[in-house]
Amino acid sequence: MGQVSLARFLIEQQRAGHINADLRLLIEVVARACKSIAHAVSKGALGGVLGDAGTGNIQGEAQKKLDVLSNEILLEANEWGGHLAACASEEMDHCQPIPNAYPKGNYLLLFDPLDGSSNIDVNISVGTIFSVLRCPDGVTEPQDEHFLQPGNTQVAAGYTVYGPSTMLVLTVGTGTHAFTLDREQGSFVLTQRDMRIPEDTKEFAINMSNQRHWFEPMQRYVGELLEGKTGPRGKDFNMRWVASMVADVHRILTRGGIFIYPRDRKDPDKPGKLRLMYEANPMSFVVEQAGGAATNGYERILDLQPGQLHERVAVFLGSKNEVEVATRYHREAGDR
Ligand code: AFP
């Protein structure tokens, strides 16, 4: 069999009854938008796109020019296709309905248009994360509340990592599959079907500078990793932290590992840094479909009922047995 493009892969998924034509076209539109973002990212300083936009988002974070540009690219690409009822983004306070000039579809799209944006100006990998939900029956004018569905209802999710090569990693609930952008052809080509995360690992990813703020179960868990071969875990662990979730998760999908962003005492009102709906949920779907696990330290992330569009959540994801150990320590400690 020759090369399998994303378009062909999606047609095959449709023929097998896993997705319908609307969802197929929606994913193709997202992929097309990611190609445009890849193009903008790769121009770097020559494209005049580096640096701050001079604005802030709902989370109070400074927006980069590429955050704003990527958000616009995704919105524009998706508004006219007829597959969506509304979009929501890290960069917008509330969801955005599809303009009346265009037909409306049955899906809701959430995205973090450019994750890891503090890495843009230093030429380190960044990415786009997306999640697709069904618009609830009978809802013609979706509001924020209609997006508040647990991650286990996602019909598709994935990310694109803009690294040395641009890769799209996708799940529609039939495994996790990786596509590499062929820049000459302008198409995503299937380069790994059914990614599998090794169940055991010797690599962890965490921002260690927050250690003094962690709660007891985190101190215990990472403390034991650091003790290495002579400690209770009986093996040496290595650490990696890109500070772009997309890049860290991509490494874990490729060779295993555990990624952790816990809740801590620094800002106890915030349950972690990462956002549930457009970071943790899509990444958890992708990771579980590759045989990994994802929890908030206590419960499966995909079973959490969201209360707000921009809700934050603690994240433990990656190699199954490692996520189980970290989750067990939290459950044993009992406090939250
Ligand atoms: P930015 O998009 O603000 O750079 O944040 C990236 C991120 O949400 C996620 O991609 C990283 O894993 C995490 O934050 C990095 O957090 P630290 O700044 O604590 O290293």
Image: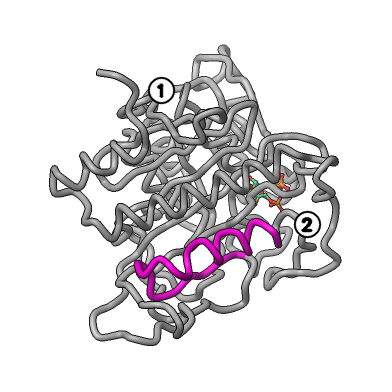
Nearer-the-camera pick, 305 or 23: 23
Quarter of the image where one finds residue 61:
bottom right
Number of other residues with Cα within 10 Å of mark 2, as a class: few under 14, some 14 to 19, many 20 or more = many
Residue 335 percent across, percent down from the top left: 50, 58
| Residue 273 percent location from the top left of the image | 63, 57
Three-letter code, disc 1: Asp
- Mark 2 vs 1, N-terminal side: 2
Compared to residue 227, the image places residue 323 above or below, namely: below
Residue plotted at (51% across, 22% down)? 232
Q: Residue at left 68%, top 73%? A: 58
Considering depth in this image, is 216 or 132 the residue closer to the camera?
Answer: 132
Foreground residue among 113 and 188: 188
Residue 87 lies in magenta, yes or no? yes
Residue 249: x, y in percent?
52, 37
- The circle drawn on residue 327 is none
Q: Look at label 2 and name its amino acid.
A: Lys
Q: Position of residue 267 (x, y in %)?
A: 71, 63
- Can you see residue 336? no
Left or right of 328: which side holds 120? right
Q: CA distance from mark 2 to mark 1?
A: 37 Å
Q: Which residues are magenta?
A: 68-90
Q: Is residue 123 magenta?
A: no
SS label for mark 2: strand
Q: Which mark is residue 64?
A: 2
Residue 74 visible somewhere in the drawing: yes
- The residue identified by callout 1 is 200
Neighbourhood count class around disc 1 (C-alpha, 10 Å): few under 14, some 14–19, many 20 upward: some
Q: Quadrant of the N terminus?
A: top left
Q: Residue at x 47, y 54 (%)?
A: 130
Q: Is residue 97 above or below residue 272?
A: below
